[in-house]
Each structure stands twice: as C-alpha cells, then as structure tokens.
C-alpha cells in the first residue's frame, strides 16, 4: 500500500487506511478513487497528487 500527498497543501491519502470520513474504505488504491475525487483540504484534483515517500 502506498501514500499519496497533495502537491498544493500536503494532505496525505494512505491507501492502507482509506478515509472513513470521506466514505473511502481501507485498502482502496489511489487509482481506484473516483475520477472526480478532490483534496478535502484545498479542492484540487487527483492530478495534483504524487506518491509520498
């Protein structure tokens, strides 16, 4: 499982944890998030995320 970070605000999506507050189940791969997924903090789309180290 990987982590992805928003390039604008730094919010991280952890595939292992998902995001229950957003209705995303643990184990959901970043690429399986809906195409209209946006960062919950700043509102940018998936294209502005990069794999976190």
Image (cartoon, rainbow, N blue to C red):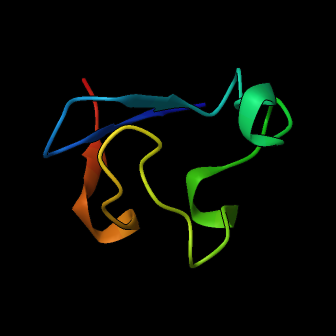
Q: Which of 1 and 7 is in front in this view?
A: 7
Q: On the picture, is 18 further left or further right than 49? A: right
Res. 43 image quadrant: bottom left
Tally of numbered discs: 0
Q: In this view, does 14 lie to the left or right of 5?
A: right
Look at 69% across and 24% down and name the residue there: 16
The image quarter containing residue 27 is top right
Q: Which residue is most to the left?
A: 8
Picture quadrant where residue 44 is located: bottom left
Q: Where is residue 35 in the image (x, y as percent from the top left)?
A: 58, 78
Q: Is residue 7 above or below residue 52?
A: below
Q: The N terminus lies in which quarter of the figure?
A: top right
| Residue 53 x, y percent position in the rendering | 24, 23
Most foreground residue, 12 or 50:
12
Left or right of 16? Residue 49 is: left
Report the residue at 29% width, 46% height from top: 42
How far across and how far down the image is residue 29, in percent? Answer: 67, 49
């Amino acid at each position: 499982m990987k982590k992805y970070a928003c390039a604008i605000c730094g919010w991280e999506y952890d595939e292992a944890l998902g995001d229950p507050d957003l209705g995303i189940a643990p184990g959901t791969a970043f690429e399986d998030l809906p195409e209209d997924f946006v960062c919950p903090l700043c509102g940018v789309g998936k294209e502005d995320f990069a794999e976190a180290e």
